[in-house]
Image (cartoon, rainbow, N blue to C red):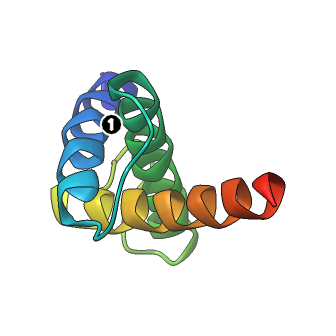
Amino acid sequence: MGLIWTIVIGFVAGLIARALMPGPNPMGFVLTAVLGIVGALVASFLGRALGWYGAGEGAGLIASVIGAILVLVVYGWVARKRGG
């Protein structure tokens, strides 16, 4: 159930992170959701590694939004590097 909850929170976090990111966002809805889910998974993994969360616990909404913003920034940086 923890993984499903992380996916749901990540989906919402991706939407929030995209709304908070300045500038044009040329990616679609599905890619935004996927990057948000990846951000929530990254936040959960880092939180467990740092001892903030126990086994089976996922990141909360705020940590997931921060993780999603980081993933969106990295994705934007990589997309710009590939494009030119």
The answer to whether residue 78 is left or right of residue 50 is right
How many labels, in total? 1
Residue positioned 33% across, 31% down in the render: 2
- Please rate how many residues cluster around mark 1, counting C-alpha atoms within 10 Å: few if below 14, some from 14 to 19, many from 20: many
Counting from the top left corner in percent of width and height, residue 16 is at 17, 52
Counting from the top left corner in percent of width and height, residue 34 is at 46, 31
According to the picture, the residue beneath numbered tag 1 turns out to be 6
User: Which image quarter: residue 62?
Assistant: bottom left
Asked whether residue 60 is in view, the answer is: no
Up-down relation of residue 52 to residue 53 (above or below): below
**18 vs 81, nearest the viewer:** 81
Asked whether residue 31 is in view, the answer is: yes
**24 vs 64, nearest the viewer:** 24
**In the current view of this chain or complex, which residue is farthest to the bottom?**
50
Query: Is the C terminus in the top left, top right, bottom left or bottom right quadrant?
Result: bottom right
Residue positioned 28% across, 71% down in the render: 22
Counting from the top left corner in percent of width and height, residue 21 is at 29, 66
